[in-house]
Image: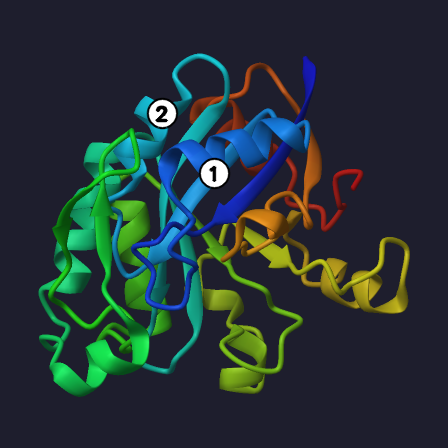
Amino acid sequence: MIDVTADLHVHTALSPCADDEMTPPAIVAGALAEGLMMIAICDHNSARNAAAVQAAAGARLAVLAGMEITSAEECHVVGLFPDAHAAEAAGERVAAALPEVDQEYTAFFGSQDVLNERGEIVGRETRALAAASPLGVTACVDLVHGLGGLAVAAHVDRRSFGVISQLGVFPHDAGFDAVELSRHVAPGSDDEARFAALGLPLLRSSDAHFVADIGAGRCVLSLEAADFASLAAALGARRTGSLPDA
């Protein structure tokens, strides 16, 4: 087993609320500068930049392909997938149900850039990634699981877009594999204990939309290797509510 320092929720410039500087090379450089060994790319309602970040990282950094789905209830569900192909399949399913961008949307959010490994723009997403999908929370989890992924309840401590704030209660029957805490929940705090009582593994991630935020939330995971299979095995064996060391 090895200790893997991870930030499993990082956005790229594809996300409508992320900085244009969140390119594959900049993200990799930022993660390495922070001493991270593994990150996950989780853009809003799409996974079209995940493979580019993986290519930019090469063997220097483990990069999981993921996506942050906005449910019909406006809950954020992070899906972590075994490979970019599975993540992209999930993204295509979600994006197909979203409206097309219009002039007002673009004026407010800017372009949604699809990038290559060098950070060059190779396309633009025309679906409104900031919109909520028509999938309910349980359907989002089922979509992730159906493609072999792990479903994480994103930033459950937040007053917006967390499943508890949006639903009023934690949906224990939805089938989440883990719960994510933001950087604002202090290790050892009463809040951490309250979320640990949910009985699922707790992860701490940055939800970085800017390069400077990469690694601001992190966890240290004891894994066989810095890869998806080892993470899946660890989460499956650790439904105890214990938090990896920050």
Q: Report the residue marked by disc 1.
A: 27
Q: Position of residue 145 (x, y in %)?
A: 32, 47
Residue 36 in view: no
Q: Position of residue 89 (x, y in %)?
A: 16, 45
- Return the residue nearer the eye: 54 or 153: 54
Residue 47 relative to residue 240: left or right? left
Amino acid bearing label 2: Ala
Residue 193 relative to residue 129: left or right? right
Q: Are marks 1 and 2 in contact (CB under 8 Å)?
A: yes
Residue 132 in view: yes
Q: Report the residue marked by disc 2.
A: 56
Residue occupying image coordinates x 33% and y 67%: 16
Q: Secondary structure at mark 1?
A: helix
Residue 3 relative to residue 124: left or right? right
- Return the residue nearer the eye: 25 or 195: 25
Q: Secondary structure at mark 2?
A: helix
Q: Position of residue 183 (x, y in %)?
A: 72, 58
Q: Hey, which quadrant is residue 46 in on the image?
A: bottom left
Q: How many marks?
A: 2
Q: Position of residue 213 (x, y in %)?
A: 62, 52
Residue 227 relative to residue 108: left or right? right
Residue occupying image coordinates x 44% and y 12%: 59
Question: Which class describes the residues within 10 Å of circle 1: few (<14), some (14-19), or many (20+)?
Answer: many
- The quadrant of the picture occupied by the N terminus is top right
Numbered mark located on residue 194 in the image:
none
Q: Earlier in the sequence, mark 1 or mark 2?
A: 1
191 shown above or below 43: below
Residue occupying image coordinates x 64% and y 48%: 203
- Return the residue nearer the eye: 100 or 96: 100
Give the alpha-carbon distance from disc 1 to disc 2, as whole Å. Answer: 9 Å
Amino acid bearing label 1: Ile
